[in-house]
Amino acid sequence: MKILVICPECYPVSDSPLARAVVSIVHAYRRQGVEALNFSPFFSQFTNENDCQQGQKLVEKLGNREYSVLKSVSCGSDLFIRYDDYFNRPGIYGNPGEKAYHDNHLRFSFLASAALNYCVETGFKPDAIHVHEWGGIAGALIKTVYSEYFANTPVLLTAHNIRYDYHSSPDDIPKLGLPADGFDMDGYEFWGKVSMLKAAMLYSDRIVFTSASYMFQLLSTDSQGGMRGFLESHRKKLFSIQSGIDYGLWNIPGNPEDFKRQRKDALRAELGLDVDSSLLMYSHLDSYSGCSAQIISTILANLLNMNLQLIIGISEHNSNYSYFNSVQEKHRNRIAILPLSENDEGLYQRLVASDMFLSISFSEPSMALFLKAAAVGSIQLSNKRTQKPYIYTMPYDHNSEEASASANAFLCEDASPDLILEQLRIAESVFHEKKSLWARLVSNVESLKVSWDDTVKNYLLLLGSNSY
């Protein structure tokens, strides 16, 4: 099977969750025997030219612009579109700390056009096209500019995060290669402008969200951009496939119990927390943490009177930072504040040392933090995010021994301070008074695994279906 992959970010951008996810998917495709051709822009700020081989120069058909195709030295199927007018800039979507570039719609429609044109010029005939975020405009181009070569080629769009959209003037519709008859409320129009995200969704045959809870949240709540109604009208082509994690990075060497205890004591000593028998809980207050900060603030006095310690990962720019920092000053043996981890290694050290991971949210798209915490034996305390628990979780129920035997998380029916505190007290009681049961819960959560190979196998099942 041959698959063309188009992503607006390039894999050397190590701090980009999107780039890391897409390259993981591409590598998993190849492990499954797929011939995957992976395209992204050549960003001179992020990509070392010495890691690339100079390729041919071509002229794409949307705007008749000449561009170069560079090949990765390590893998000739990882390709970069070089067009310095669009991609030789300080940032990917905008200059750091400033607004988005005014021509992002043109930049990424050009990326899609250049990737499709390469296939035409080299005779690469994909069985499917897998696009990500704004690379999704390719779905429109194969129905207009490149319709002859890509007739009946299915397009699968992975929508990693719909908060990122870009709106442009309808005057640019011909420049984007969009069918003019799609510019209305039911199509890619948004308040009189062109929505790049809606266009990508409209002209893709399948839209995949990166977790079941994310798709449920988008279909059950009014989300940004007025997307709910649009998504509901395309419900038949919406799917969820859980994104995986790399278990080469997320694992526990040797004896898990001993390793976690050693890392726990080492982290507490490093942070000035008492090295005692307390339950250690970590909360990661990033942009997806929802109401976690408010809930922690509400119940913090209760937490400080419990036999537990709390580590909070939080940015100095977070509006709650000053408050948590002031509490830390008075209770240094019970609470510690750390900056948000910029890489997986830092996050690994926190999660592997923690007994519990507190995460109250409705919108984390990929549930990656949950899977990473599970991989290193940190039991999650959270709210339900769908009508059911997470698709992979079993909630602890202190009233049912049968349920407790297979449980791997402490889940609340709703994200309210009272319910969170109630579950936390139950968890504290199990941790201190039922050691064998706690060990079973840890074992259960460690056995929960979703790898990138698992993710890609589901993609291939979807691509192989006859329902296009």
Image (tube, grey):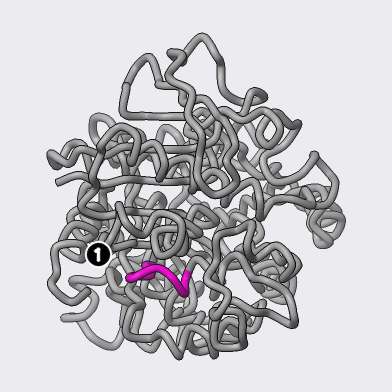
Question: In the rendered view of the protein, which quadrant contains the C terminus?
Answer: bottom left
Residue 131 visible to an observer of this rendering: yes
Q: In this view, does 386 lie to the left or right of 397?
A: right
Using the image as rendered, state which of residue 158 and residue 330 is in the foreground.
158
Tell me if residue 209 is in the magenta stretch: no
Residue 421 visible to an observer of this rendering: no
Q: Quadrant of residue 35?
A: top left
Residue found at x 47% / y 74%: 202
Q: Is residue 248 left or right of residue 33?
A: right
- Residue 370 drawn at (x, y percent): 42, 59
Q: As shown in the figure, which amino acid type bears the numbered disc 1?
A: Asn
- Residue 311 drawn at (x, y percent): 62, 50
Above or below residue 354? Residue 291 is below
**Element carrying mark 1:** loop
Residue found at x 57% / y 52%: 109
Residue found at x 36% / y 73%: 212
Residue found at x 38% / y 89%: 387
Using the image as rendered, state which of residue 12 and residue 17 is in the foreground.
12
Above or below residue 70? Residue 148 is below
Using the image as rendered, state which of residue 323 and residue 187 is in the foreground.
187
- Residue 426 drawn at (x, y percent): 43, 76
Using the image as rendered, state which of residue 140 and residue 400 is in the foreground.
140
- Residue 5 drawn at (x, y percent): 36, 45
Q: Is residue 167 left or right of residue 76?
A: right
- Disc 1 marks which residue? 152
Q: Quadrant of residue 263?
A: top left
Q: What's drawn in magenta, residue-wise?
A: 201-208
**Crowding near pointer 1: few (<14 within 10 Å), some, many (20+)?**
few
